[in-house]
Image: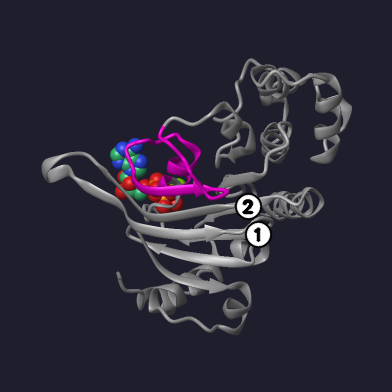
Amino acid sequence: MLQIKNLNITFGHGTAKNHALKEISLSVQRGESCGLVGESGSGKSTVLNCISGLLNNWSGTINMHGKALQRKRRMEFYRKVQMVFQDPYGSLHPRHTVDTTLKEPVAIHGLGNANQRVEKVLSEVGLGPQFRFRFPHQLSGGQRQRVAVARALILEPELLLLDEPTSALDVSIQAEVLNLLKDIRGKRQLTYLLVSHNLAVVAHMCDKILIMNQGEIVEKITCAQLQRGDLQQQYTRQLLLASKGYNRTAIDQFQDY
Ligand SMILES: Nc1ncnc2c1ncn2[C@@H]1O[C@H](COP(=O)(O)OP(=O)(O)OP(=O)(O)O)[C@@H](O)[C@H]1O
Ligand SMILES: [Mg+2]
């Protein structure tokens, strides 16, 4: 479904120049769930932003279904590829009801049956009809993120780009939303590219995991390899340790790679 080759991007000029992505190559098959893990600033969101078209000063190739994507995307692309952001507080318009938020993309793409679509997608994300005319401030964090997922699903996309979809949520709610996303993928046969700094989250959600460090992909592993602890890079072992919780002696031994 998605194939990226030698993706590069730099921000800034002169001494402030930052080569944020260096020769990133990856591929995601249809129906696959691929995870992108790495510490803060390693370039995970930047990869998603290049794919989704939010950034356009990249070089390299991004192919979807074997066809190279141009800097300016077709309307159809914005229907097929949807993004869910980290912060459900910032990503929903504060003065739009859930109903308005969900109907907006339907109108933009000229699709019919808006009411039916809204009802269907709300029940799919586990929100009853009583939520339909609420404003974001009348929802909990988990419920807001469910609305953000519903907004992504309402256009019947093929590929979901999920940028830390649960890291702004309470730990108990995180698992709920992750399981919801997992169920939806199974039912809709969606393809996911999921970003997280938490290896445990990605292990729960993904078949294949890419480890990023300082703008590069340093290791590609399967979920089975992760469970066996079959890791090549010391950096990946550190990430695994970090995602298991706070351990003072282990953290003191961390090194920069
Ligand atoms: N629009 C931008 N302009 C300038 N620099 C940017 C821009 N977007 C990202 N960067 C820089 O690129 C690098 C990678 O950022 P990115 O947001 O992709 O990291 P990340 O892995 O998503 O981190 P986090 O886990 O904290 O979200 C950082 O050094 C960041 O400062
Ligand atoms: Mg990020």
Judge the density around disc 2: few (<14), some (14-19), many (≥20) Cα neighbours within 10 Å: many
Q: Which of 29 and 177 is in front in this view?
A: 29
Which residues, given as a range, are shown in magenta? 46-71
Q: Where is residue 118 in the image (x, y as percent from the top left)?
A: 81, 26
Q: Residue 95, image x and y in percent?
A: 63, 15
In the structure shown, which secondary structural element does the residue marked by tag 1 occupy? loop
| Residue sitting at the far left | 14
Query: Would you call the spot at circle 1 few (<14 residues within 10 Å), some (14-19), or many (20 or more)?
Result: some
Q: Viewer-proximal residue, 224 or 157?
A: 157
Residue drawn 46% across the image and 35% down it? 53
Image position of 235 (left or right of 224): left
Q: Is 114 situated above or below 26? A: above
Which labelled disc corresponds to residue 192? 2
Contact, mark 2 vs mark 1 (Cβ under 8 Å)? yes
Q: Return the residue at label 1.
A: 32
Disc with the residue nearer the chain's start (2 vs 1): 1
Q: Which residue is drawn at 60% across and 39% down?
A: 81
For the point 54% across and 66% down, the residue is 209
Query: On the rendered structure, is 13 left or right of 53?
Result: left
User: What is the C-alpha distance between the residues marked 2 and 1?
Assistant: 6 Å
* Picture layout, residue 69 above or below residue 244: above
Q: What residue type is labelled 1?
A: Glu
Q: Is residue 109 magenta?
A: no
* Residue type highlighted by circle 2: Tyr
Q: Is residue 44 left or right of residue 147?
A: left
